[in-house]
Amino acid sequence: MPTKKIDFMQLPLALQERAAYRFLALPYEETTSYLKGTSKAPEAVINESHNVEPFDLGVNAASRGIKTQWLNNPEEYNIEGQNEGRSFDVIVGGEHTLTYYTALKHEINTLFIFDAHLDLYNEYNGKSLAHATWLRRYIEEKPGVEVYVFGVRVGSEDEFIFANNNGVKINDALLPKGKKIYLSVDVDALDISAMPCTSNPEPAGLSWETLFGISESLFSRNNIVAADVVEHKPCKELPQFSYAVAKLIYRLFSLKEKYRG
């Protein structure tokens, strides 16, 4: 957590006090196994967010206020008062394990994940709950929730067997409709050329256009109750990718604003 208070898009205090949206900075990083540094993502994204144009998709979500809050760990996440149609949260990590905690707080029927990986290991590096196991733990706890993972191109044989046995929809072109969804965006779903600054970059991934296009389809046809953006590892010499993540986060607020009613 930064020693100096910083806020997403540096909006006036009056807007933050009556905010319709929350940016929840969660620099949680406990099990990263390849390129470390995701804990630095929230601060890097906020620092770049002043370059984001608030008028997006024909709406101005920032005019309704975006409140920035810092959390020390995922278990601090609280949705009290957030499910009254007044507010919409984007949780910004940090590693993907945090989604296990934050998604469980919401009553949903569908979990939609953008990710290069299945994250369905039973155990990873001796841990039962880690960035590569969190989705298996979630499914075990919430077996009735429909799960989509889009952008997958890496997984073990055991993970694919578990996914098949538990009805996980992998790279399914038929998107959900009329569902209550928690959306999780692991930025490594993007191609390595489009997002090199992540903890587990992978080739042959999604383009930004595809990610934005599918996201709009989801918001336009469903009730997205909350979202997270995870696994960005800021690159010191390439701050433009932290800007791109800031743009992605603001696009989620804009989509909620556009399709709110």
Image (cartoon, rainbow, N blue to C red):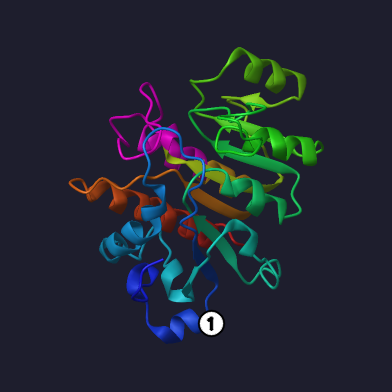
- Residue 34 in view in this figure: yes
Residue 51 painted magenta? no
Q: Magenta region's main secondary structure?
A: loop
Please determine whether, in this image, residue 205 is positioned above or below residue 72: above
Left or right side of 135 for 18: left
Which quadrant of the structure image shows residue 196? top left
Tell me the kind of residue under disc 1: Arg
Give the magenta range.
188-215
Q: Quadrant of the C terminus?
A: bottom right
Q: Please state which of residues 80 and 1 is positioned toward the viewer in this rendering.
A: 1
User: Count of labels shown?
Assistant: 1
- According to the image, label 1 marks what residue? 18
Query: Going 32% across and 29% down the picture, which residue do you hit?
Result: 192
Please determine whether, in this image, residue 104 is positioned above or below residue 136: below
Query: Going 69% across and 22% down the picture, which residue do you hit?
Result: 163
Q: Residues within 10 Å of mark 1 (few under 14, many from 20)?
A: some
Left or right side of 184 for 232: left
Query: Going 63% across and 38% down the picture, which residue do you hit?
Result: 134
Q: Secondary structure at mark 1?
A: loop
Q: Residue furthest left?
A: 237
Image coordinates for residue 35, horizontal then vertical, percent: 36, 36
Q: Quadrant of the N terminus?
A: bottom left
Left or right side of 79 for 165: right
Q: Residue furthest bottom?
A: 14
- Residue 142 in view in this figure: no
Please determine whether, in this image, residue 138 is positioned above or below residue 71: above
Residue 194 painted magenta? yes
Query: Going 56% across and 52% down the picture, which residue do you hit?
Result: 227
Left or right side of 111 for 153: left
Image coordinates for residue 70, horizontal then vertical, percent: 49, 68
Please determine whether, in this image, residue 106 is positioned above or below residue 124: below
Q: Residue furthest right?
A: 144
